[in-house]
Image (cartoon, rainbow, N blue to C red):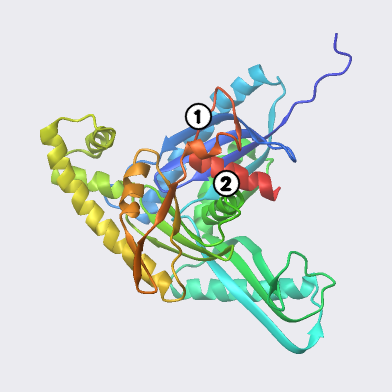
Amino acid sequence: MKLWPTPAPKITLIYDIGSSTIGAALVTLEKNKRPIVHYTVRRPIAFQKQVEPEKLIFAKKNALKETTEIILKSGISTLKVDLHKNIKIHDIYCVLGAPWYVSKTAIIKVEKPESFEIDKNSVDILIEHQEEEFKKSLQKEGLDRLTILEKKIVHAKADGYAVQILSGRKMKTLELSIFLSLSENKVLSHIKEVLHPFFSFKKIHFHSFPLAYFSTARDMFPQISDFLSVDIRGELTEVSLVQRGVLVETVSFPLGRHSLIRMFAEKLKFTPEVALSFLKLYISGKIERDMKLEMQKVVDLVEKDWRVTFDSALAEISTKTLIPNRIFVASDFDIGNLYASWIKTEKIDRLGIASDFHVEYIDETYFAKALLWSKRSIHDSFLALSILFINKII
């Protein structure tokens, strides 16, 4: 006999919105406890034979609607049976992958001859100035009507020493590393148009995937302060530099999983759907010898193009700093090992000495102990990264 009803657990809905798929998870987040992943779903964004921004936004909108309908019809109904009949979604977070945002890490330096203290209002003014400068630079590139997603201090130094708290501290020099991310209003509007009919009473929180990736990787490997994080998805590859525990820079190029699919479709006269099926067979090794040889020729072409562009991205980063030899790779599950193998055979020039990269492929096995997965949830590395990040910031 229950004298008092058991309260319904608070459920958070977290979306991972990429360029080729959209994932969603229903989770319980509690302080000092591992997040519980109750239910997950991931749906593809319609494949584009030629990438056109407006068509891609429309396809994303359709995939987001489909994903949300599955969450409501299957996910919520399942939780009502498993957990509590009055289950409700309390918070909604969308973590945006490329190309749905732009980001920058700004370095702010203040130096005075006499010791000074700095308060929150003064820091806010410095950050707002960087935000306005970033917006102006993007407007010159043709991007307009932008909304700030994040403006976060990721590192602070007082008199050359890393500090966690600035309040009440006297210093002569101050250096702040500020991560800024923005998204076009039309991108956010499309997301809100889909979600508001279902969740009109809820505020939707937006974040960018590079900050989630950087923050989670830094927490998982606290002994590593310098590394590259590589995010390879449908349309794009993103390379982020982390130096001394600070997310310094992110560069991207338009070659990802879909590059393979398009090349298979073009060279072997396949439809995109058939090309994807053969790609999965090729990667799994379950394909006859003659077809494997034909497909290997296509893979070699894509690998060559990807390597050249990846090297250019590294060259762009290396003009400012020494490239770390540690790389964390996150990728669409069906091509992750393939691209990771390409990076493993790359050479890095460190002060005139060629050496290999040390590559960690961040697949779902990395999160087996960091999260609690229910029997109704599928292990998903991108959702896991996003969940751990959201759990940390709230």
Could you say which quadrant of the image residue 35 lies in?
Answer: top right
Using residue 143 as the reference point, say whether residue 6 is left or right of it: right
**Sequence order check, earlier mark of 1 and 2:** 2
Residue name at image x 80 percent, y 85 percent: 115
Residue name at image x 85 percent, y 12 percent: 2
Residue found farthest to the bottom: 113
The image position of residue 111, as x and y in percent, is 70, 85
Say few, some or many: other residues with alpha carbon within 10 Å of mark 2 (under 14 / 14 to 19 / 20 or more): many
Using residue 95 as the reference point, say whether residue 239 is left or right of it: left
Task: Say what secondary structure mark 2 lies in.
Answer: strand
The image position of residue 167, as x and y in percent, is 82, 69
Look at the image and tell me whether residue 72 can be seen.
Answer: yes
Task: Say what secondary structure mark 1 lies in.
Answer: loop
Residue name at image x 25 percent, y 38 percent: 279
The three-letter amino acid code for the residue at tag 2 is Cys
Say few, some or many: other residues with alpha carbon within 10 Å of mark 1 (under 14 / 14 to 19 / 20 or more): some
- Which residue does the numbered mark 1 point to in the structure image? 378
Could you say which quadrant of the image residue 163 lies in?
Answer: bottom right
Q: Nearer the viewer, residue 68 or 180?
A: 180
Q: CA distance from mark 1 to mark 2?
A: 19 Å
The three-letter amino acid code for the residue at tag 1 is Ile
Circle nearer the viewer, 1 or 2: 1
Callout count? 2
- Which residue does the numbered mark 2 point to in the structure image? 94
